[in-house]
Amino acid sequence: MDAGITQSPRHKITETGTPVTLRCHQTENHRYMYWYRQDLGNGLRLIHYSYGVEDTDKVEVSDGYSVSRSKTEDFLLTLESAPRSQTSVYFCASSESTVLHGCLLSARKGQLD
């Protein structure tokens, strides 16, 4: 069964200062695509996202990265010089629609006033 989304390469070791491009490929014809990074001991952090072909945006974690999306199926992430600070696990995702601003939920013990 096709996973619907794949990224390549699966593993990469490179010399610092060398540009590296990661490819995200999806077969679901989704409009939205995302690149995340997950550092050891931390949660996922969004780097870049795309609304469609040639329509991309970045977030706070985007320094040292660039992206391109010349067709619906592919979203490329380039680490411009692959410094040690960009050593991480990278994930891509795609979706039909998205919510860019979520809800922060805080729970506390006891009665709320």
Image (spheres, grey):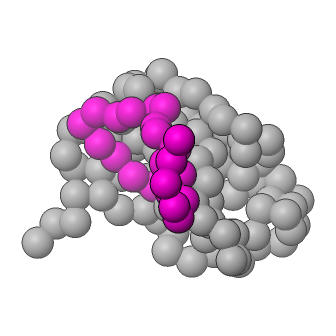
- Left-right relation of 102 to 13: left
Q: Position of residue 83 (x, y in %)?
A: 86, 61
**Residue 2, image x, y percentages:** 16, 66
Q: Which residue is at 68% across, 77% downward?
A: 41
Q: Which quadrant of the view contains residue 99?
A: top left
Name above or below for residue 90 compared with residue 15. above
- Image position of 47 with respect to 13: above or below: above
- Residue at 66% x, 35% y: name it: 59
Quarter where residue 16 is shown: bottom right
Q: Nearer the viewer, residue 23 or 59?
A: 59
As rendered, which of 33 and 9 lies closer to the eye? 33
Q: Is residue 52 in sight in this rendering?
A: yes
Residue at 35 percent across and 34 percent down: it is: 98
- Tell me which segment is drawn in magenta: 92-113
Q: Nearer the viewer, residue 21 or 26?
A: 26
Q: Is residue 35 left or right of residue 96?
A: right
Q: Is residue 90 visible?
A: no
Q: Quadrant of the N terminus?
A: bottom left
Asked if the magenta segment contains residue 101, the reply would be yes
Q: Is 109 above or below relative to 60?
A: below
Magenta segment, prevailing SS (helix, strand or loop): loop
What residue is drawn where x is 73% and y is 45%? 61
Residue 15 falls inside the magenta stretch: no
